[in-house]
Image (cartoon, rainbow, N blue to C red):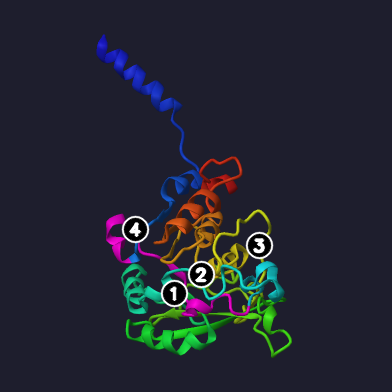
C-alpha cells in the first residue's frame, strides 16, 4: 500500500512539473557578479572564459585629472580659488595599474580562438577585448598586446558633441573624442551586424549593415547613476556588446569602476563579471548601478 501511495504521489508531482521555456533555461545559467578584488585573483571565483573583455584602463594622467575641467576651481570659477580637486587624481589605480598584469589576465580569461571553418566573408566565433584608452596610449597598448598573443587590432573613435576641457576653450582646439582598441589573436572575432544566412550558411545579401570604426558618444539618462569620474555610458557599451557577442555569452570587465559594463551586459542577457579594488566604487556600483529604484537587487531577467 505504501508503494502505491508513493508512486501516485510521484506521478502527481510529475504532472505538476512543466518544461522550462528557453528564457527560463537561460535565467538559470546567466550570472552577474562584481568582486572587490584584484583581477589577478580570478581563480578564486571560477569565472567561465569570456567572449568579450571590456576595460577602461587608467590614462596615467595622475594628479592632473581635473586639469582642464572647471571642477579644478570652486564653483567652476577661477575667481573662487582652487577646489579640493585641484592637483588631485581621480583614483589610485592611475599610479599602480600594471598593464602587463592586465594582458596576462586577458590571455587566460578570454576563450580560445574558434577552430571551426567559416564561409568566405564571414567572421568566426572567436573572442576579443576592447580597451578604452587615450590616443597617446594606443602604441603602448598594441605593443603590450602583441607580447601576449593579441597580434591584431582595430582602432575605434567615439565622437562627442561636448568637451570637458572648458578651461582651454579660449586657448586651443579642445578634445571631444574618446578612443578604444579592439584587440584579438589570430581569427577575426565574432561579429554581429544583423546579417542573416540561408540554409547553406551563405549570407543573404542586403541583410547586414556596415559598421564604421567611429560611434556617436551618447550620454546616459538620469536613470543611470553617475558613480565614476571616467564612467563610460551604458548606451555606448551596449552597442559594442551587441556587435561582438550573442545572448548567453560571457562579458568581463576587470577594472569595472561604476559597474556600467556589467549593467549593459546584463540588460542584453549576457553573463557579466567584474573586478573593482576601490571600496567606494565597488560599494556604489553594487548598491546603485546594479539595483532598481525599489532597492531590490536587479535581476537580469526583469528586463525580458
Can residue 304 be seen by looking at this rendering?
no
Query: Which residue corresponds to mark 3?
Result: 220
Which of pointers 3 and 1 indicates the residue nearer the eye?
1
User: Label for residue 148?
Assistant: none
Q: Secondary structure at mark 3?
A: loop
Q: Secondary structure at mark 1?
A: helix
Identify the residue at horizontal 42%, vertical 56% (top origin). Answer: 279
Seen in the picture, residue 138 relative to 217 is either above or below; the reply is below
How far apart marks 2 and 3 lie (CA) works out to 21 Å
How far apart marks 3 and 4 lie (CA) works out to 29 Å
Task: Bin the neighbour count of mark 4 within 10 Å (Cα to Cα): few under 14, some 14-19, many 20 and up.
Answer: some
Task: Bin the neighbour count of mark 1 within 10 Å (Cα to Cα): few under 14, some 14-19, many 20 and up.
Answer: some
Q: Secondary structure at mark 2?
A: loop
Q: Quadrant of the N terminus?
A: top left
Q: Earlier in the sequence, mark 4 or mark 1?
A: 4
Q: Are marks 2 and 1 in contact (CB under 8 Å)?
A: yes
How far apart marks 2 and 1 lie (CA) works out to 8 Å
Amino acid at each position: 500500500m505504501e508503494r502505491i501511495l508513493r508512486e501516485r504521489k510521484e506521478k502527481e508531482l510529475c504532472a505538476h512539473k512543466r518544461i522550462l521555456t528557453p528564457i527560463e533555461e537561460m535565467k538559470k545559467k546567466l550570472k552577474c557578479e562584481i568582486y572587490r578584488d584584484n583581477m589577478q585573483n580570478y581563480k578564486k571565483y571560477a569565472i567561465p572564459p569570456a567572449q568579450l573583455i571590456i576595460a577602461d584602463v587608467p590614462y596615467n594622467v595622475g594628479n592632473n585629472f581635473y586639469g582642464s575641467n572647471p571642477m579644478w576651481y570652486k564653483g567652476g570659477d577661477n575667481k573662487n580659488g582652487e577646489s579640493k580637486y585641484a592637483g588631485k587624481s581621480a583614483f589610485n589605480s592611475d599610479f599602480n595599474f600594471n598593464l602587463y598584469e592586465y594582458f596576462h589576465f586577458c590571455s587566460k580569461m578570454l576563450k580560445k580562438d574558434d577552430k571551426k571553418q567559416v564561409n568566405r566573408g564571414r567572421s568566426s566565433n572567436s573572442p576579443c577585448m576592447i580597451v578604452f584608452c587615450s590616443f597617446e596610449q594606443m602604441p603602448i597598448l598594441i605593443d603590450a598586446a602583441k607580447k601576449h598573443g593579441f597580434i591584431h587590432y582595430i582602432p575605434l573613435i567615439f565622437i562627442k558633441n561636448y568637451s570637458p576641457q572648458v578651461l582651454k576653450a579660449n586657448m586651443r582646439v579642445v578634445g571631444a573624442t574618446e578612443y578604444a582598441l579592439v584587440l584579438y589573436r589570430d581569427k577575426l572575432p565574432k561579429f554581429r551586424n544583423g546579417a542573416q544566412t540561408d540554409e547553406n550558411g551563405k549570407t543573404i545579401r542586403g541583410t547586414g549593415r556596415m559598421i564604421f570604426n567611429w560611434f556617436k558618444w551618447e550620454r546616459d539618462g538620469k536613470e543611470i547613476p553617475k558613480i565614476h569620474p571616467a564612467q563610460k555610458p551604458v548606451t555606448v557599451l551596449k552597442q559594442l556588446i551587441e556587435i561582438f557577442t550573442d545572448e548567453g555569452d560571457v562579458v568581463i570587465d576587470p577594472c569595472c569602476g561604476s559597474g556600467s559594463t556589467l549593467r549593459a551586459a546584463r540588460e542584453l542577457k549576457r553573463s557579466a563579471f567584474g573586478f573593482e579594488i576601490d571600496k567606494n566604487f565597488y560599494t556604489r556600483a553594487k548598491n546603485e548601478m546594479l539595483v532598481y529604484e525599489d532597492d531590490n537587487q536587479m535581476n537580469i531577467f526583469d528586463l525580458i
